[in-house]
Image (cartoon, rainbow, N blue to C red):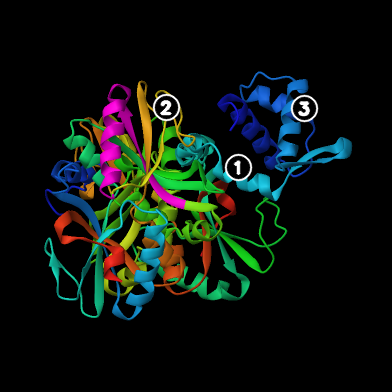
């Protein structure tokens, strides 16, 4: 292992190269590094690039610049664990900042989850999602479907269809844009009895994991959304965020207003220090538990259909999403 | 309605409780250890026990001491179901408990996946903090199917389960002698001991602390799962007297 500082710069250079579709040259990499707060010149970038080439993480394409190799992509997923421990929450912070949907003009961007499903199973999947949307536990019925070669730069592999579902973190963006300091905190499994939420059976904080909590619960197959649909009793995915209790009323107004735009799923806003469904809360803080959007996708998976989901993926124009 | 007075317990609190209840004394070779109970189908017993034996003899676990439980057996109020077999294996929290009982407070930080290259541990690649989750991190990682412990056994490279704790620098000599006493009685599993104020397996430590990475007691279960057998891990964690346990060699 080399010096941690050099290692960090190497990783940052690889990130820059991996984010570009075309080969990138040392000049552009140096500019981008400066934007990101790394004070490093073109000559030093060339030195670092040689190290990356030697390790087989990047490839040179003549004067055009460099691209990342498969080996390099893997390295990006594994290196700098201390950074990636904060990756989930950093990504959330970035996306809630970018959310600009206006509840009054009904225009702007919201956060979505992207799920990939085989082309031949898409009709079945959509039917199930439709049923879940009508369940009444407040999951937004709006989705967007992408196929190969769409205009939104969403990469869809051949024979797959990508479905965007409304991500519950959109609420955090709305709260932030209305001046409320919001802190998305835990993803969890919420037990439901007779269509009423009872308590969380497990929680994982967005702050202390290198893997997205909702993704963890989905691959643990810990949901039973279909049971909730049939009998009113089962387990669903939910997350919880905290706001200062002084903002409770304002938050309630926003949640109310959001429902006019089909942005649904907020269960209630807690009182100061009130422990909602077993989740801890500090004095002066109010929790807001929300049913997450991928519950409909969890139901599809429970039905035996193969789905790959990336929660909290990207932002898209809300007007382009249609009712299922 | 929402159940009253219900509050979730995070793994960090469960761990402190288990550490406090550990009474094992490596010098006297007596007392209680922290164990995980895993449950598998009776029909798979021979194959699974062979996997346990192989993984344990390669050192990819905390200890080779185990206890088998037959259907109907009860441990700490948990009963093994019909046609199932339970196995109690030593949990890595035992190491923290023993250090605590020798007067050293170590702080378990997280469980994660450690990448091994040609037999050398290189770095953590995925982690979950104990205070951030109500499910044991190593159980979470097993359910993500990201381990490659079998490959590690075959080729010397792969990803195994491990956990990290921070220990005060001032106690380094005491800790090393206690760890040596533990190894003498068959409780090992120390993957890496860092230097004070230096990163260990790519992870920073607190000021004037050093990191100790311990191999997860759940690695044999990960191998069982990677080989396609059903195994339910962490049905519960509890304490067990070492006198009730045997070396896996003596059972097979």
Give the residue at x 30% y 44%.
B183
State which tag comes first along the sequence, 3 or 1.
3
Tag 3, which secondary structure?
Answer: helix
Residue A46 numbered tag: 3
**Which residue carries the number 2 mark?**
B195
**Crowdedness of circle 2 by 10 Å Cα count: few (<14), some, many (20+)?**
some
Mark 2 secondary-structure assignment:
loop
Instruction: Categorize mark 3 by other alpha carbons within 10 Å: few (<14), some (14-19), many (20+).
Output: some
CB within 8 Å, label 2 to label 1: no
Q: Residue at x 33, y 53 (%)?
A: B217
- Residue A76 - label: 1
Question: Which chain hosts label 3?
Answer: A
Callout 3 and callout 2 share a chain: no
Residue A195 versus residue A87: which sits nearer the camera?
A: A87
* In this rendering, the label closer to the viewer, 3 or 2: 2
Circle 2 or circle 1, nearest the eye: 2
The spot of residue B96 in percent (x, y) is 25, 40
Residue B206 % position (x, y): 37, 25
> Mark 1 and mark 3 in contact (Cβ < 8 Å)?
no
- Magenta-drawn stretch contains B109: no
Badge 1: chain ID: A
Region of the chain picked out in magenta, as a range: B160-186
Residue under the point 25% across and 36% down: B178
Q: Is residue A174 left or right of residue A190?
A: right
Q: Is residue B74 above or below residue A259?
A: below
């Amino acid at each position: 292992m080399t010096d941690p500082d050099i290692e960090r710069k190497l990783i940052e250079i690889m990130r820059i190269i991996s984010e570009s579709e075309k080969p990138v040259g040392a000049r552009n990499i140096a500019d981008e590094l400066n934007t990101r707060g790394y004070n490093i010149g073109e000559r030093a970038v060339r030195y670092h690039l040689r190290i990356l080439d030697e390790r087989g993480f990047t490839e040179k394409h003549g004067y055009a610049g460099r691209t990342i190799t498969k080996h390099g992509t893997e390295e990006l997923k594994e290196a700098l664990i201390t950074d990636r421990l904060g990756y989930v929450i950093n990504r959330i912070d970035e996306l809630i900042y970018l959310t600009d949907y206006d509840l009054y003009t009904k225009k702007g961007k919201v956060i979505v989850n992207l799920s990939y499903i085989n082309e031949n199973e898409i009709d079945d999947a959509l039917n199930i999602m439709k049923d879940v949307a009508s369940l009444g536990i407040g999951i937004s019925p709006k989705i967007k479907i992408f196929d190969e070669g769409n205009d939104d730069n969403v990469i869809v592999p051949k024979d797959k269809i990508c479905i965007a579902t409304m991500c519950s973190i959109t609420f955090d963006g709305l709260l932030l844009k209305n001046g409320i300091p919001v802190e998305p905190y835990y993803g969890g499994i919420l037990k439901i009895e007779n269509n009423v939420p009872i308590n969380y059976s497990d929680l994982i904080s967005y702050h202390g994991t290198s893997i997205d909590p909702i993704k963890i619960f989905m691959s643990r197959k810990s949901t039973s959304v279909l049971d909730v649909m049939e009998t009113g009793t089962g387990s669903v995915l939910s997350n919880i965020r905290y706001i200062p209790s002084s903002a409770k009323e304002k938050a309630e107004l926003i949640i109310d207003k959001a429902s006019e735009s089909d942005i649904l799923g907020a269960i209630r806003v807690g009182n100061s220090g009130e422990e909602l469904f077993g989740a801890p809360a500090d004095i002066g803080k109010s929790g807001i538990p929300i049913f997450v959007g991928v519950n409909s996708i969890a139901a599809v998976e429970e039905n035996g259909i193969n789905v790959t989901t990336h929660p909290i993926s990207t932002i898209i124009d809300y007007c382009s999403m249609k009712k299922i | 309605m929402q159940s009253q007075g219900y509050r979730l317990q995070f793994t960090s609190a469960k761990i402190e409780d288990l550490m406090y209840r550990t009474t094992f004394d490596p010098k006297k070779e007596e007392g209680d250890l922290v164990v995980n109970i895993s449950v598998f189908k009776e029909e798979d017993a021979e194959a699974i026990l062979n996997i346990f034996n192989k993984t344990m003899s390669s050192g990819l676990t905390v200890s080779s001491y185990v206890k088998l439980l037959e259907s109907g057996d009860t441990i700490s109020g948990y009963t093994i179901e019909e046609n199932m077999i339970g196995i109690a294996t030593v949990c890595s929290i035992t190491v923290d408990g023993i250090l605590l009982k020798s007067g050293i407070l170590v702080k378990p930080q997280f469980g994660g996946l450690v990448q091994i290259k040609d037999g050398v541990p290189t770095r953590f690649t995925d982690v979950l903090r104990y205070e951030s989750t109500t499910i044991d991190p190593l159980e979470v990682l097993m359910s993500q199917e990201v381990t490659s412990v079998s490959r590690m056994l075959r080729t010397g490279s792969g990803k195994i389960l491990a956990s990290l704790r921070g220990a005060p620098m001032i106690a380094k000599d005491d800790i090393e002698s206690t760890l040596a006493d533990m190894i003498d009685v068959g409780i090992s599993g120390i993957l890496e001991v860092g230097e004070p104020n230096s990163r260990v397996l790519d992870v920073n430590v607190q000021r004037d602390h050093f990191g100790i990475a311990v191999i997860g007691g759940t690695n044999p279960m990960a191998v069982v799962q990677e080989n396609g057998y059903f195994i339910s891990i962490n049905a519960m964690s509890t304490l067990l007297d070492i006198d009730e346990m045997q070396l896996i060699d003596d059972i097979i």
